[in-house]
C-alpha cells in the first residue's frame, strides 16, 4: 500500500515515509492509495474477535509486512491498545461509545499510543533524532506526551493556546519532563496548527531538524481511529437495524476514521458530525461553501477548530462532491447553553454523566432522529473524554459531584512547565533553531 498527498495524487510514498514526514512536501495530508474492503467472513466472525485482533486485521490492510512484519505489528497494537472501548446502553436504541479508558482519559490515546510505537519502530537503530511538533486544543497534547514519554531518540513539542484549554488539561500538558516540552502560544488552536504546518515546509528548519507531526494530520494517528468503529458495531445487540453514529467534530480526524471504516464495509447508514459554535464544517455540509475563520473558545474545547485539516481527506473520500458527502453525513451545531442543557438532559433521562463533547454529539443525534421515520435503529454517541476532565462544567450542570480519577488528581499536584511564545511562526522557528 502506497500513500498519496491530498494535493498531488500521483506522488506516492511508503507508509514509513508518510509517518515520518507527517505532512507531505506540498503541504497535503497523506491518504492510502485505495480503501480496502473487508471480506464477508471478517464480519461473520466479528463477535469472536478481540479489540486488538480487529485492529490488526484493519491495520494489516494498510501496512504491508515488508514495512512492519505481522508479528511486530501485532505487538505494536497489543501494547498500544491495552484498554477497552465499551459500548454503554442508554436505552434499547441509544448507546454511548466510551473512548476515554486510556491513560489520559481521552480518545486521542488510541492514535497517539499506536503512532508512538510505530514511529519508535521505524527510527530504532537509525541513530537519528526525531522532533515531533503537535498542535493541541486540549486532549491531543496529553495523549501524545504520554504515548511518547521517555521514547529514545524522540523529542516532543506541544503547542497549545494560552488560556484556551481547561486547567486540568493544561496540567496534563505541562507537567511532564524528559523528552516533552510544552509551548504556550498566545493565540488560538488554529494559530498553533498553522505554525506547525509552516515548520514542515520550512527548508531551513528541516535542514537542521528531523520534523514530524503527531496531530491527526499524521496517517499513523488516523489508522487506529478506524478500529473502534468496528469494535462498537461488534458490541451492538444485533446486526439487523440501521446504525447512526454521532461524532463530536473539530479537526475532523475522528469523523474521517469512521468514514474510512464505512468505505471498508462497516454498515453505518449515517454519520452525524456534531459541532459546537465553531461550525465551519456544518456550514460547509449545508451550503457547499467552506469559509474558515478564527476559532472561538467553548466548553467543548477539543472541537474549537476554525480551519479543520482533515476536511481535505473527507473531500478526497467523496471526490470533492458535497452532494455525495450529504448522503453520508448530517451535521448540526450547538452553543454552550445547548451543551449544558444536554448534560442535564442525559443525566436526568438516562442517569448517565456525559462530558461537553459527548453532549454535543447527543444533541446532534437527537435532532437527526427527529427527521427520520425509522422506529427501529441503533444510535451511537461517541464519548471522547472522561467527564472529570471538565469537572466544573459537568458538576454545575448536573448538581452532582464527579469522582476525580487518580490519574487526573495526581496531575493537579505537579508543577507547570511551559515555554511562552508569541503568536508568530518566527518565534517558534527561532526557538527550535536555538535548541537544534
Image: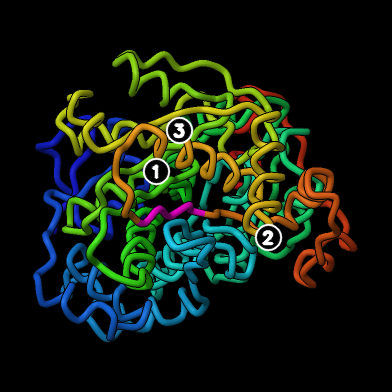
* The disc label shown at residue 77, or none: none
Q: Secondary structure at mark 1?
A: loop
Between 372 and 190, the one nearer to me in the picture: 372
Residue 114 place in picture, x, y as percent? 43, 67
| Secondary structure beneath label 2 | loop
Disc number for residue 197: 3
Q: Are marks 1 and 3 in contact (CB under 8 Å)?
A: yes
Residue ID at (58%, 63%): 100
Q: Nearer the viewer, mark 3 or mark 2?
A: 2
Left or right of 110? Residue 352 is right
Instruction: Categorize mark 2 by other alpha carbons within 10 Å: few (<14), some (14-19), many (20+).
Output: few
Q: Earlier in the sequence, mark 1 or mark 2?
A: 1
Q: Nearer the viewer, residue 82 or 90?
A: 90
- Residue where numbered disc 1 is placed: 217
**Residue 198: x %, y % from top left:** 46, 29
The image shows residue 70 at horizontal and vertical percentages of 23, 81
Q: CA distance from mark 3 to mark 2?
A: 43 Å
Q: Residues within 10 Å of mark 1 (few under 14, many from 20)?
A: many
**In the image shown, does 199 or 54 lie closer to the viewer?**
54
Q: Residue at x 33, y 45 (%)?
A: 256
- Please tell me whether the stretch drawn in magenta is mainly helix, strand or loop: strand
From the image, state whether disc 1 or disc 2 is nearer to you: 2
Which region of the structure is painted magenta? 378-382
Of pointers 3 and 2, the one earlier in the residue sequence: 3
* Residue named by callout 2: 351
Is residue 205 something that shows in the picture? no
> Position of 422 compared to 412: left or right?
left
Q: Is residue 276 magenta?
A: no
Q: Position of residue 146 (x, y in %)?
A: 62, 65
Above or below: residue 429 compared with residue 289 = below
Amino acid at each position: 500500500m502506497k500513500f498519496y498527498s491530498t494535493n498531488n495524487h500521483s506522488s506516492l510514498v511508503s507508509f514509513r515515509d508518510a509517518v515520518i514526514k507527517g505532512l507531505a512536501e506540498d503541504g497535503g495530508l497523506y491518504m492510502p492509495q485505495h480503501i480496502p474492503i473487508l471480506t464477508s467472513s471478517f464480519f461473520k466472525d466479528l463477535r469472536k474477535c478481540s479489540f486488538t485482533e480487529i485492529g490488526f486485521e484493519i491495520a494489516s490492510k494498510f501496512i504491508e509486512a515488508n514495512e512492519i512484519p505481522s508479528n511486530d505489528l501485532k505487538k505494536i497494537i497489543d501494547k498500544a491498545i491495552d484498554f477497552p472501548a465499551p459500548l454503554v446502553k442508554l436505552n434499547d436504541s441509544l448507546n454511548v461509545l466510551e473512548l476515554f479508558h486510556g491513560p489520559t482519559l481521552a480518545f486521542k490515546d488510541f492514535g497517539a499510543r499506536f503512532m508512538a510505537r510505530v514511529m519508535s519502530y521505524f527510527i530504532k537503530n537509525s541513530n537519528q533524532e526525531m522532533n515531533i511538533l503537535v498542535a493541541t486544543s486540549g486532549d491531543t497534547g496529553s495523549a501524545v506526551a504520554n504515548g511518547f514519554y521517555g521514547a529514545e531518540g524522540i523529542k516532543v513539542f506541544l503547542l497549545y493556546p494560552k488560556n484556551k484549554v481547561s486547567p486540568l488539561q493544561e496540567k496534563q500538558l505541562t507537567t511532564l519532563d524528559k523528552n516533552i516540552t510544552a509551548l504556550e502560544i498566545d493565540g488560538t488552536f488554529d494559530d498553533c496548527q498553522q505554525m506547525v504546518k509552516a515548520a514542515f515546509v520550512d527548508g531551513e528548519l528541516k535542514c537542521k531538524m528531523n520534523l514530524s507531526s503527531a496531530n491527526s494530520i499524521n496517517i499513523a494517528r488516523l489508522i487506529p481511529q478506524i478500529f473502534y468503529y468496528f469494535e462498537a458495531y461488534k458490541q451492538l445487540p444485533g446486526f439487523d437495524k440501521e446504525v447512526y453514529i454521532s461524532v463530536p467534530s473539530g479537526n475532523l480526524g475522528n469523523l474521517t476514521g469512521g468514514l474510512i471504516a464505512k468505505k471498508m464495509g462497516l454498515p453505518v447508514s449515517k454519520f452525524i458530525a456534531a459541532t459546537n459554535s465553531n461550525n465551519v464544517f456544518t456550514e460547509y455540509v449545508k451550503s457547499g461553501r467552506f469559509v474558515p475563520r478564527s476559532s472561538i473558545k467553548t466548553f467543548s474545547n477539543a472541537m474549537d477548530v476554525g480551519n479543520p485539516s482533515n476536511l481535505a481527506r473527507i473531500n478526497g473520500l467523496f471526490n470533492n462532491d458535497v452532494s455525495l458527502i450529504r448522503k453520508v453525513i448530517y451535521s448540526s451545531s450547538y452553543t454552550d447553553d445547548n451543551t449544558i442543557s444536554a448534560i442535564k438532559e442525559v443525566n436526568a433521562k438516562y442517569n448517565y454523566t456525559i462530558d461537553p463533547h459527548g453532549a454535543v454529539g447527543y444533541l446532534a443525534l437527537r435532532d437527526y432522529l427527529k427527521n427520520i421515520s425509522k422506529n427501529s435503529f441503533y444510535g451511537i454517541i461517541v464519548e471522547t473524554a472522561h467527564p472529570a476532565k471538565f469537572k466544573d462544567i459537568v458538576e454545575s450542570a448536573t448538581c452532582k459531584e464527579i469522582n476525580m480519577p487518580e490519574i487526573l488528581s495526581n496531575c493537579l499536584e505537579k508543577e507547570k512547565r511551559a515555554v511562552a511564545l508569541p503568536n508568530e511562526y518566527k518565534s517558534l522557528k527561532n526557538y527550535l533553531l536555538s535548541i537544534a
